[in-house]
Amino acid sequence: MSDQPSSPPSALRSPGSSQSRFQVDPVADAPKTPPGSRSSAGEESKSRVRAVNFLNPSDAAPDAGVNGDTVRSEASLHSSSHFSDTHSSTYYLRTFGHNTVDAVPNIDFYRQTAAPLGEKLLRPSLSELHDELDKVCALLMKMLTIAKGVISEFIRCMLNIWGVMLFIRMSWIVGQAGIALSCAIVLTAIVVTSITGLSTSAIATNGFVRGGGAYYLISRSLGPEFGGSIGLIFAFANAVAVAMYVVGFAETVVELLDSIDALMTDEINDIRIVGTLTVILLLGISLAGMEWEAKAQIVLLVILVAAICNYFIGSFIPLKSKEPQGFFGYNAAIMMENMGPDFRDDETFFSVFAIFFPAATGILAGANISGDLADPQLAIPKGTLLAILITGVVYIAVAISNGSCIVRDATGDDNDTLVGSLENCTDAACTLGYDFSICKEGGCKYGLQNDFQVMSLVSGFGPLITAGIFSATLSSALASLVSAPKVFQALCKDKLYPGMHVFAKGYGKNKEPLRAYVLTFIIGLAFILIAELNIIAPIISNFFLASYALINFSVFHASLANSPGWRPSFKYYNKWVSLAGAVLCCVVMFVINWWAALFTNVIVLALYIYVSYKKPDVNWGSSTQALMYNQALTHSLHLTGVEDHIKNFRPQCLVMSGYPNSRPALLYLVHAFTKDVGLMVCGHVRTGYRRPNYKDMMNEQVRYQRWLLKTRIKAFYTPVFADDLRQGAQYLLQTTGLGRLKPNTLVFGFKNNWRDGEMKDVETYINTIHDAFDLQFGVVLLRLKEGLDISHIQDEFQTSQEKPPGMKDLLVSINIKDFDSDSSKPSSKSTSCQSSPCLDSHSDGTHSLQSIHYTKKPPMQLSPADEKLLAASQQFQKKQSKGTIDVWWLFDDGGLTLLIPYLLTNKKKWRDCKIRVFIGGKINRIDHDRRAMAALLSKFRIDFSDITVLGDINIKPKNKKMFEEMIEPYRLKEDDMEQEAAEKLKAKEPWRITDNELELYRAKSNRQIRLNELLKEYSSIANLIVITMPLARKGTVSSALYMTWLDTLTKDLPPILLVRGNHQSVLTFYS
């Protein structure tokens, strides 16, 4: 409640002022009336919500008293204040301490419009006081609507559960299984449906339930994979169920026609004709709208209830004429005789149960129209559980009644009476004066075992039972005809399957799925024309049972996941009971028909695999996600308690990629050896911000993570704000990861343009490498002679295109599909064009993602250098041609230099590449060193094609001129200046190379020059070179000299990886 008016208070006036002490203004429906003007009658009728504007205490006269919300003056008769109702825009007057629209007597109500002492106020009109009752009316209407929803749910479930089985199969079941086992069969079905009903109630009360019934409940609980698979077969089962019920109705009609010799053609074609006309009529009722359909359901329920009452009334009125047909009224002898089973014709308990159980598969009939219920959370639990209770009681009552007043066999002949003593009687009929012993030989047409229409015999009025059969079949068919389109519409709206969204369109104010109705009608009509459903019926029952099993499993799964979002208002459920219900449903499936159950499971599995593979872009907060989180958290915690072992080592890479799509070559190469093996984190250090915008950073994190998922790169994106690259890298090196899921290898792109920029950036770059080694990380550098970063091309593209409002940070990615996955050559799409690459956007534009691909008429021409850069950036996305990965394992770093190439060759894209190993050695021990390395690789179980021992690594390089020219700008040349000046310059520019340093490391410098010559000689055509990275002692080797070593070593070569592990073993030959 609010104690302040929405409009500012009026100013207090002195007693002599012409301004009123307070005024009443319309605040809801009508505009405010200017002071001094009079509202018309029409305006008064509209302005039913009014406010009192109180005077400002700061302007009050000295004699005016202000206390809380009470204002006293000469003209006041009672204290008044504002009171706000938060459920409406109504402002009340507080009168006598209560909130009311009814105003107290006030002089201002009696003023004339132009009164000198104040304005005329308008008292609440009589209509306004009456209108306040709208709240009560609205509450009553809401309660009535909810009650209608509960009744609608209740009626639908009862009509579906009270099916044909009640009238034409229940008596036969009692005859076969006996009263005791018949009750056991019914109770077993009730247990299954009750557990499912409890689970349905729990899911339905855990949030707002929209249309879609079982599909909606399962998909929002277990996710789109389970929901999509079960939703499709559930909708199809409901569509075929229409045909099943209509054919049942048509068969009864045809039997009646046959009894009066009025068949139109033959039985099969008559069933088709009657069934077709019936389903057209039902479709018309359904299309007329839910109100007509609900009215039809009520009429059918009345007939059905009347038929049931008719049977029970008739069971208490035994007639002598009915005794030859087996009906004697309630009798203890008959009840005891029918108490036990008498299975015939190879029937068993399970086969009889299989025949009865489809009668109990209607509990989701109401939930299937959940979108049309006013309050599904209240209607579904109460309606479903009440329907299960009442129908279960009726089924048990009918079973006991049948078994207590009807014998199993009767001849129907009035002459089969027993004459003489009844002392030797062995059956109930004998004790009642009838001899039906001839029935043991077979041929009798009456009694529980022989007459499916025995309930018509017992009833007080036989035709009413026939009407009940019609009601049961038509009501079930109508419910299925309504349920199937609703479920199918909800499924199509989620776009889980291609080409089905056309059926999601709704028409009218209730969004009726007319297209889905037509589809259901066509499916139902197709099966009606078959007119033989003995094969498909078990599959339908199994489809329903599969839905029940998944609903029960959903509750168990959600409870097991222990998600804070799982808090249903319906509390009468238990996760273990739900699990037992799911298992029981699966058992019943196989009991009813094992091959149909197997077929159902295969279909569900196939649809599940399809939806899982498609990965629909939906997020419903399913229990699968919650359980996945729980498992990930549990396993991460368990891993922290286990020490690392060499056999389980895997490279877990922190890739300094910047925006993930700005360096695609780096990203895809690292992904090649970490996919399904190790962790990959794309680190991005964002610098140059005076005031970091964390909101934008978080939005970009979500966007780029989605980009990684869309491009199927299994990695995480982690941005940080920092002053420079080194600080940001330190943040990432220290904080990235969780427990054992932490990076152990830092991956960089080589800084190709290091000589063109400021040397402080080089200092930062080299110090970042040193920091990684200090933190016991391995380091990997990738160099492509064309470069790695394509972000400048993205910037050019963005400036050349007109960006729509609100679109920021347009992303650019390489189109992976430009290359054939099974060939090293570009696909026909890319090879058909000989011109330069161009940039084009996706048709959907949903994530502002752009693709680079080849077309004949590029909208933006690229320079030759950029063309080469783009081509190079794509080279690791395609399958590598037959070639080699040359491993220059010069120094033992723990084995990381060898492990990465091995992991690469295990991937499909690199499978055709062979590993060649190059090692250093002495000229006089080349064979020995080769055999030793071969033995070591054999123990490591790493395949290789060749081992080359280089005995001439340490000889003088042929050309040192390039190296000298490279270091010349960065030399300190302290011999040419005073010592003090040299020291100041070195302190100011620590990256400079001193003469002493250059002389001290001349041999190491020569080695880098010589290795570059050898690399060009042996590995100039390799697909990839992996070489041990040279180390520089921290604080001794300047960053300029170290950078020169790396540049000299890798210059003008194929793609090359510089690798240096942390000198902890990552390979072992022990088991």
Image: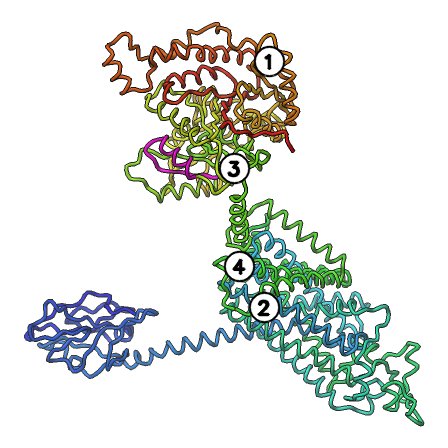
Q: How far apart in space, not on screen, are marks 3 and 4 (Cα)?
A: 46 Å
Local secondary structure at mark 4: loop
Q: Quadrant of the C terminus?
A: top right
Q: According to the image, what is the colour scheme of the structure?
A: rainbow
Q: How far apart in space, not on screen, are marks 4 and 1 (Cα)?
A: 75 Å
Local secondary structure at mark 2: helix
Front tag of 1 and 2: 1
Q: Quadrant of the N terminus?
A: bottom left
Give the image location of residue 403, x and y in percent: 77, 82
Give the image location of residue 1067, x and y in percent: 58, 29
Q: How far apart in space, not on screen, are marks 2 and 3 (Cα)?
A: 43 Å
Local secondary structure at mark 3: loop
Q: Which mark is residue 949?
A: 1
Please name the amino acid that badge 3 sits on. Answer: Leu
Instruction: Report the magenta residues as a range.
Output: 716-735
Q: Which mark is residue 417?
A: none
- When the figure is inspected, residue 379 is found, relative to residue 761, above or below; the finding is below
Residue 732 painted magenta: yes
Which residue position holds label 4?
506
Q: Quadrant of residue 561?
A: bottom right
Q: How far apart in space, not on screen, are marks 1 and 2 (Cα)?
A: 74 Å
Q: Are marks 4 and 2 in contact (CB under 8 Å)?
A: no
